[in-house]
Image: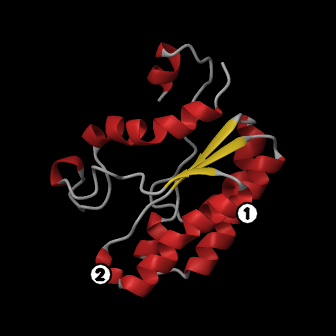
Amino acid sequence: MQLRLAQQGYEHRVVNASISGETTEGGATRIDAALQDFAPALVIIELGGNDGLRGFPASRMKANLEKMVNRAKSSGAAVVLLGIRIPSNYGPRYSAAFEAVFRQVSAEYDVQWIEFFMEGIALNDELLQDDRIHPNAEAQPILLDNAWPIISAKLER
């Protein structure tokens, strides 16, 4: 992302404040410190997958995403939300509730979002780590391409 920003004339600095294995609860706990430390112009939230894999209630995930969105917007940062889906073995009821959270948060808080950030990657074993869940290094340019339209729309030159 940093390279693409520079190539397209943006002067923004990318800070990856993520932690591998993070849940929305962890993100909600850490958002205030990250906002204070980095004073971002844009916050990209891509959390929830680990909540789903652990079977956390969708309502809990939604509350955590809402907290992060509210805190980021209150700090003056623009926000984009990168949605995720979970494997079908979690059942249609849970999957539907899980996926609806991203749509609801987007609508309720006027946040741009992508329905499925892993489009074109999730079912391609060549683009996944050995766990067949997380994207590998080769998938990173595709992830950026998936997210770029809403990210670039929120940036100022």
Residue that badge 1 annotates: 67
Q: Quadrant of residue 104?
A: bottom right
Q: Residue at image x 65%, y 63%?
A: 105
Give x and y (percent) for residue 38: 71, 36
Q: Is residue 27 visible?
A: yes
- Toward the viewer: 77 or 114? 114
Circle 1 Cα neighbour tier, 10 Å, few/some/many (<14 / 14–19 / ≥20): some
Left or right, 126 with reference to 3? left
Left or right, 72 with reference to 85? right
Identify residue type, mark 1.
Answer: Lys
Residue 32 shows which numbered tag? Answer: none
Q: Residue at image x 51%, y 79%?
A: 97
The CA distance from mark 2 to mark 1 is: 29 Å
Give x and y (percent) for residue 148: 48, 35
> Which residue sits furthest left?
126
Q: Secondary structure at mark 1?
A: helix
Q: Residue at image x 45%, y 78%?
A: 96
Residue that badge 2 annotates: 89
Above or below — where is 9 with respect to 126? above
Sequence-wise first label, 2 or 1: 1
Q: Quadrant of the C terminus?
A: top right
Give x and y (percent) for residue 129: 24, 53
Q: Quadrant of residue 68?
A: bottom right
